[in-house]
Image: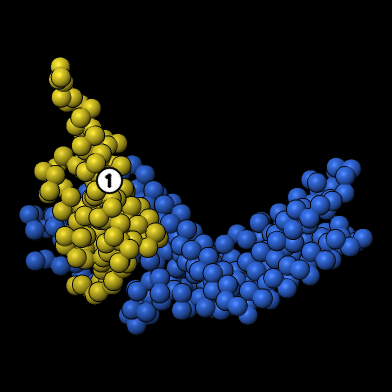
Chain colours: A blue, B yellow
Amino acid sequence: MKELKPEQIEHLFAFTRKHFVEYYDLQLELVDHLASGIQAQWETDPELPFEKALQAEFKKFGVFGFADVIGKRQKAMNKRYWGIIWKFVREWFIPFKLFLTVLLFVLFYQLLSSDYGELFFEITAILIVALTLGGFFYNYRKFKRQGGGKRKKWMLEEIIFNTGGFVSYSILPVQIFHFLANDNTALFANSWSLGLASFTLVILLLLAYIIFLHIPKRAEELLMETYPEYKLSKMM
Amino acid sequence: MGNSKLYKGSLNTIILKLLDENGKMYGYEITQKVKALSGGDLNITEGALYPALHKLEAEGLLEVEVAKVDNRLRKYYKLTESGEKETVNRLAELEDFIRSMQKLVNPNWSID
């Protein structure tokens, strides 16, 4: 069977990049697909020019080309990322860590029920935003220092170091506070609102720890787990 | 007919069933197999296949293996343990659905 030459494979990689496929994991799969399709065409017509066979194969992806594949891959990878976060959150529920979490919850509850409860909530909420912003820039710089963006791009790696857009969620308590503070009644008038506020702060701190420190530290390990091609592509 | 929504809704089940029967398969192979099995009726487009594969992978129903073929890398998909269980469930659901539709489309009228 007529095979593609290495320079034609390179051309296919360039072709996917030209059609906005930035990530190597997806490029790899689409290049194999196009190459398989071209080889199948050559089986019936060995004289068919490479470029013509490529266009025929690309046409099968429809009018939007690779756009749908890219968009849905991003969605699937985000889902996977949140699955990873959830896995680490679950790991937190072992006796010692759970004890620490409950202790933190009780501490927040006590502080919020004091006379300065509202002030404490606002300060903590703002601190969380500052911490997450700091965490975001720290990870972003680390990613750039490691050559991120210039070498092969992996979708999950980018999500990990962009910290999954968590910064936008971290603003939530501040917004809730300002929304509720417009009301004249005391913010933490009953144990339910106190409990909910303490719980939100604890969960946000736990998520921030997992997203900004725990996961980026294990990025390499997670990439190897997610992409069997990660290790292989490094050797090629 | 090939692009009907009825078929699209069953794409994931079809992929799971194919992988259950064939062990591991790669993307291009799956499209060709579906086309061959349906005699061209079910024209599963490349634009629909990969999102379905990636979604099933993200759900933990499929896992990926990579091998060097010719002068490139190829991704093979295969069922995980939970994927195998899910295939049985989804096929049973699909068969139930087909039975219900048959009753609806072709009711067995009787005067008893």
**Is residue B92 visible to the viewer in this orientation of the structure?**
yes
User: Is residue A172 rendered to the left or right of residue B108?
Assistant: right
**Is residue A144 visible to the viewer in this orientation of the structure?**
no
Q: What element carries label 1?
A: helix
Residue A60 appears at what percent x and percent y? 25, 47
Residue at 15% in and 67% down? A3
User: Is residue A125 rendered to the left or right of residue A55?
Assistant: right
The image quadrant where one finds the C terminus of chain B is top left
Considering only vertical position in the picture, is A151 above or below A27?
Answer: below
Residue A219 appears at what percent x and percent y? 51, 75
Q: Mark 1 points at which residue?
A: B93
Residue at 34% in and 73% down? A229
Dot 1 falls on which chain? B
Most foreground residue, A226 or A22: A226
Residue B51 appears at what percent x and percent y? 35, 52
Q: Which residue lies furthest to the front in this view?
A: B112
Residue at 15% in and 24% down? B108
Q: Residue furthest right?
A: A115
